[in-house]
Image (spheres, rainbow, N blue to C red):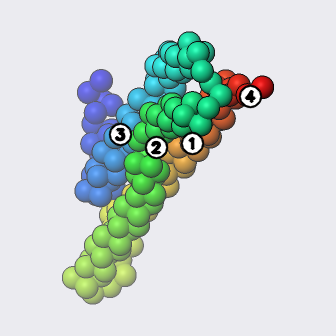
Amino acid sequence: MIEILETIRDFTETGGQVLLIIGGLIFVMWLMILERVMYVFVTHKQYKNAVIAKWTARSERSSWNSEQIRQAMISRVSLKLSAGVPIIQSLVALCPLLGLMGTVTGMIEVFDVMAISGSGNARSMASGVSKATIPTMAGMVGALSGVFASTWLARTAKNERASLEDSLRMERKV
């Protein structure tokens, strides 16, 4: 366990302080993604069944008022289902930007070394180059993993809304 923590510490030192920020951002993003996945697979099904039961228990399902109540029910379910998805998408978009910031800070360090040493010594520039490339890589990996999850969450919310609209049928006036 200590070896793992030392490896993480060494990797963080190699990537610079921006890597810590990217790591924290990815951690928060995945906590939010896991919360949404748990909601979809556990809580949403119960809530959807309760809404369907409430709709079928209504005696009158053909008037304009009933249509408005139906739309309100669908909107509430849809809002609960897609809550947090825009924030997750924003965090996904922020990952590569922070990686770019790490690239810039790493290159500034390379230029500082070049200015101080007065030459292009590769050994003295290696630290800055790693601080320039590792945060970029981490930002891209975080963004790619988050893109797949946020796309799945958005698609699931859309499909569940359509499914609920089909389940809450209006009766036609005869």
Question: Position of 43 compared to 24: left or right?
Answer: right
Lower sequence index among marks 1 and 4: 1
**Mark whose residue sits in front, 4 or 3:** 4
Residue 81: x, y in percent? 49, 33
Residue that numbered label 4 is attached to: 172
Check contact, mark 2 vs mark 1: CB within 8 A: yes
Residue at the location (40% across, 48% down)? 87
Residue 68 image offset from top left, x and y in percent: 54, 37
Amino acid marked by disc 3? Phe
Disc 1 designates what residue?
154
Q: Could you tell which of marks 2 and 1 lies nearer the N-terminus?
A: 2
SS for tag 4? loop
Labelled pair 2, 3 in contact (Cβ < 8 Å):
no
Q: Nearer the viewer, mark 2 or mark 4?
A: 4
What is the C-alpha distance between the residues marked 1 and 4?
A: 32 Å
Query: For the residue marked with disc 1, what is the amino acid?
Result: Ala
**Mark 4 → mark 3, Cα distance in angstroms:** 50 Å
Residue 85 numbered mark, or none: 2
Q: How many neighbours does mark 3 have within 10 angstroms: few (below 14), some (14-19), or many (20 or more)?
A: few
Q: Count neighbours of disc 2 (C-alpha within 10 A) and say few if under 14, some if 14 to 19, many if 20 or more.
A: some
Q: Residue at x 46, y 43 (%)?
A: 85
Horizontal relation, residue 16 to residue 99: left or right: left
